[in-house]
Amino acid sequence: MKAIKIICMSKEKLKEGINSALKNKDNLRLSVLRGLLSAYVNELVSKGRKPDTELTPDEELAVYKRQANQRKDSVQAFRSGNRPDLADKEEAELEIIKEFLPTEMTENEIKEIILKKKEELNIDDNKKMGILMGAVMKEIAGRADGNLVRKMIEDILNNS
């Protein structure tokens, strides 16, 4: 969990990034960072807090993940709509947002955790997949895509 706290950036760091992008005339980065700051403040307000307060690291991570998922969905939509120019722009924005997210785990690391939890919980069939999924996702703590984890768990349970 400490890795997430180090990677997440406070509102002040976002503002510093905005100032740096302004000085460097990096319009794409500026736009993305302003969007992240806006999403950050909107999250504060939606939780009934004042805009000048800070989010917890978990709340902050959720904001950044939501923004990244929106970009991923947009890329898919633009690719299927035959708009590669817009898809490329969204991918570039996604790369900037990824700087604020913890590094993704490899499939081998995920598989290792799944097998460890499967043995700990003594799970051998798909009936208890939800229990295994919950335990694995709790340990992974936002460092892997849930759909990938689900698919890997299904594969492991079906092959055992």
Image (cartoon, rainbow, N blue to C red):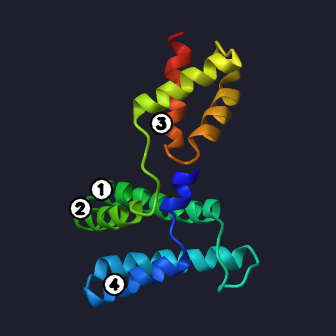
Q: Earlier in the sequence, mark 2 or mark 1?
A: 1
- Look at mark 4 in the image and give the residue it sits on: 20
Task: Please give the name of the residue rendered at 40% of the width and 60% of the height, measured from the top-left corner.
Answer: 98
Q: CA distance from mark 3 to mark 1?
A: 21 Å
Q: Residue 153 at x, y = what percent?
A: 54, 25
The numbered mark at residue 79 is: 1
Figure disc tally: 4
Q: Residue 97 at x, y = what percent?
A: 41, 65
Foreground tag (4 vs 3): 4
Marks 2/1 in contact by CB < 8 Å: the verdict is yes
Quarter containing the C terminus: top right
Task: Please give the name of the residue rendered at 67% of the width and 76% of the height, measured from the top-left corner.
Answer: 44
Task: Please give the name of the residue rendered at 53% of the width and 14% of the height, measured from the top-left corner.
Answer: 158
Instruction: Tell me which corner region of the image, top left, top right, bottom left or bottom right, holds residue 119.
Output: top right
The numbered mark at residue 126 is: none
- Look at mark 3 in the image and give the residue it sits on: 148
Q: CA distance from mark 2 to mark 4?
A: 29 Å
- The amino acid pointed to by label 2 is Pro
Q: CA distance from mark 2 to mark 1?
A: 6 Å
Secondary element type, mark 3:
helix
- The amino acid pointed to by label 1 is Arg
Tell whether 96 sits left or right of 4.
Answer: left
Q: CA distance from mark 1 to mark 4?
A: 32 Å
Q: CA distance from mark 2 to mark 3?
A: 25 Å
Q: Earlier in the sequence, mark 2 or mark 3?
A: 2
Marks 2/4 in contact by CB < 8 Å: the verdict is no
Task: Please give the name of the residue rendered at 25% of the width and 85% of the height, measured from the top-left corner.
Answer: 24
Foreground tag (1 vs 4): 4
